[in-house]
Amino acid sequence: MVKSANNMKEVAQKAGVSVSTVSRVLAGKTYISENTREMVENAAKELNYRPNVMAKGLKLGRSNAIALMIPSIDNLMFPDIVRGVEDVAQSHNFVVTLCNTDEDMNKEKLYMKKLSNMGVDGIVFATMRKNSDYVRSLHEEGFPIVLTSRNYDGKLDAVVINNLLSAYKGVSYLISRGYKNIAIALGDEELPLYQKRLLGYKKALEEANIPYKEELVMREVGTNDSFYPLTKDLLKNHPEVDCFFATNDIRAIIIIRALRDMGLRIPEDIGVMGFDDTQISALVDPPLTTIHQPLYEIGASAAKRLIFQIQHKQEKGNLALPKIEILETELIVRKSTK
Amino acid sequence: MVKSANNMKEVAQKAGVSVSTVSRVLAGKTYISENTREMVENAAKELNYRPNVMAKGLKLGRSNAIALMIPSIDNLMFPDIVRGVEDVAQSHNFVVTLCNTDEDMNKEKLYMKKLSNMGVDGIVFATMRKNSDYVRSLHEEGFPIVLTSRNYDGKLDAVVINNLLSAYKGVSYLISRGYKNIAIALGDEELPLYQKRLLGYKKALEEANIPYKEELVMREVGTNDSFYPLTKDLLKNHPEVDCFFATNDIRAIIIIRALRDMGLRIPEDIGVMGFDDTQISALVDPPLTTIHQPLYEIGASAAKRLIFQIQHKQEKGNLALPKIEILETELIVRKSTK
DNA sequence: CTGAAAGCGCTAACAG
DNA sequence: CTGTTAGCGCTTTCAG
């Protein structure tokens, strides 16, 4: 195999100095005579020297890479989070490895096994679940980890939103607009974020003295698409429903489709509210009234915190105490509610 | 700093054998007595041994990672391509580093500098431009590279679609539906793919004996948003226009918005066709008639080819001759045309 | 200010 | 079948 034939040794030879000198000028931390510095820099440039990432990493005990675990980049929640992560990673001279897990724990474990020992210096998990113990034990070994969006318990760093409050704000708004019989479309209830959104919904109803009815809670069976029949069924049994609070934008879109196929107009006949404010929500018809999550900032903050932990560990030998960062959401009123 | 304290040496000690033996059983290629194999495997399991990616990479001269350069993951063209790349990478035991370049050559060069020497074993570029000479020279050094979507010239591997033919098919369909005055919304004309789509448009017109009119060509100024005023202006000056052929879906959506704001109904009053068939095109109103690009397959094929080249180089010492792979597109008729 | 030497963790001859 | 040894390319003492 043709070797890359481009290393410090060659630069050293060309410049007529030792490898250690080359290392020193390229690191640029210590004083070097102006003369040799120039020689080395020229030699490096002429040979188009590019440092060997692996060698450096092996020696220094770090890779300058972080990983980001997400369910799937196809889910419109994640492109913005990824951008946030990558932008701050880049500005700190880190590179990011993207891992799509499809919510498959085995896939995730495989990735972690491959990456945890020098593959990356830390991991952002947007995939945390109740039983992700392998994540916790990796953290206990002292491996830098930051959670986003999902489960968190105070033991690990996390950057999240206040789901209860956000749902509460949304549903309160609906009530303030005169809606009285609001159904809710829930996601995977194993995830605390959906439990919290349900709680927020309940709280808003309670505060308005609207009785909570279990029958108005739509629970996903399998995929998002299940909300299509669910919506039709619900409305058949409860024609009094005048609004749907969907716990994400895709569900809102599916509900709208079902409603339209029943001959209903949005928002004239019935209202629909989304959650997340992903890229599509402004583009669909009608543009969605929804709760904006600062996705980019979530990614950016998570990466910042992760890199902080990586450096902390590098310098002090251990991780800093975990911190939960809560970012603000915002109600975005568009055209899917009256 | 607390070292990860988990290496072959420890496993070897615990198992009472030498490091090379550990290496051998863990590699699993050569015969080892059943006895020691078991000892080693147990020791490894008990110590939760995870191989050091960097050490292995340095020794073997490969990282088992590939990079993917894209303009931005926010652009809905790319999530599917990324999934395609990652799925095949994963199945070949590679990991993928995602690089958002924002079409910024300096950012891209920085990434390449950082990744080219052992950072990754090869790169998929979805960002190729006329003047991306640094990509070509990296390739000439023998570095595995595959292009997608953009420029290509036969010197580098590429997986693409036939843009001319696809546009031709699309516009021919429009003509067959009775549209006679079709405007076109072009993208960055430095990119051959848009030149080709224009050519396809022209060819379809020509074949139908419809004269090509330069005035019906809308050229982007700055961002996609420029098509909003552009559309209004065009229609003011050319009220005879009965259809817009947009060279991507986002542009189609913006045009639709402009048209609606002028009081026009789609498709009753005027038609709009998109291109790409990204995730949103089925979700917007009206759902877009568009040209489907097999985005996932593009990513998957590119990754396959890249890994092939990496292995070829590994085994034979040089790259295989470049190959251009052309994937099929498909006309998707939805509701934005009559 | 600079060179020699050791070693990060792993694999691959080379012996035996 | 297994141990010893060298070395991947780099950084970092330790001398000088």
Image (tube, coloured by chain):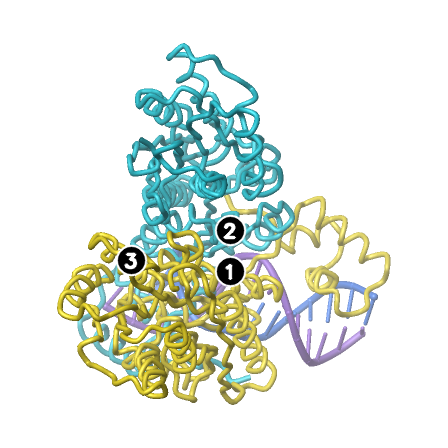
Chain colours: A yellow, B cyan, C blue, D purple
Comparing B210 with A317, the one in front is: B210
Quarter of the image where the N terminus of chain A is located: top left
Judge whether A309 appears above or below A89 on screen. below
* Residue drawn at point x = 76 percent, y = 53 percent: A41
Residue at the far right in the pictured view: A34
Q: Position of residue A217 (x, y in %)?
A: 22, 75
Query: Disc 2 on helix, strand or loop?
Result: loop
**Crowding at label 2, few (<14), some or many (≥20) Cα neighbours within 10 Å?**
many
Q: Are marks 1 and 3 in contact (CB under 8 Å)?
A: no
Q: Position of residue A274 (x, y in %)?
A: 37, 65
* Residue matched to label 3: A256
Q: Is residue A82 visible?
A: yes
The chain letter for the residue carrying disc 2 is B
Identify the residue at horizontal 41%, vertical 10% (top origin): B209
Location of residue A143 (image quadrant): bottom left
Inspect the image, locate mark 2, and give the three-letter code of the amino acid beneath it: Ser
* Element type at mark 3: helix
Disc 1 or disc 3, which is closer to the eye?
Answer: 3
Tell me which corner region of the image, top left, top right, bottom left or bottom right, holds residue B164.
Answer: top left
Visible residue check, residue B301 = no
Q: Is residue B338 left or right of residue A276?
A: left
Q: Is residue B268 above or below residue A105?
A: above
Q: Are marks 1 and 2 in contact (CB under 8 Å)?
A: yes
* Residue B72 marker: 2
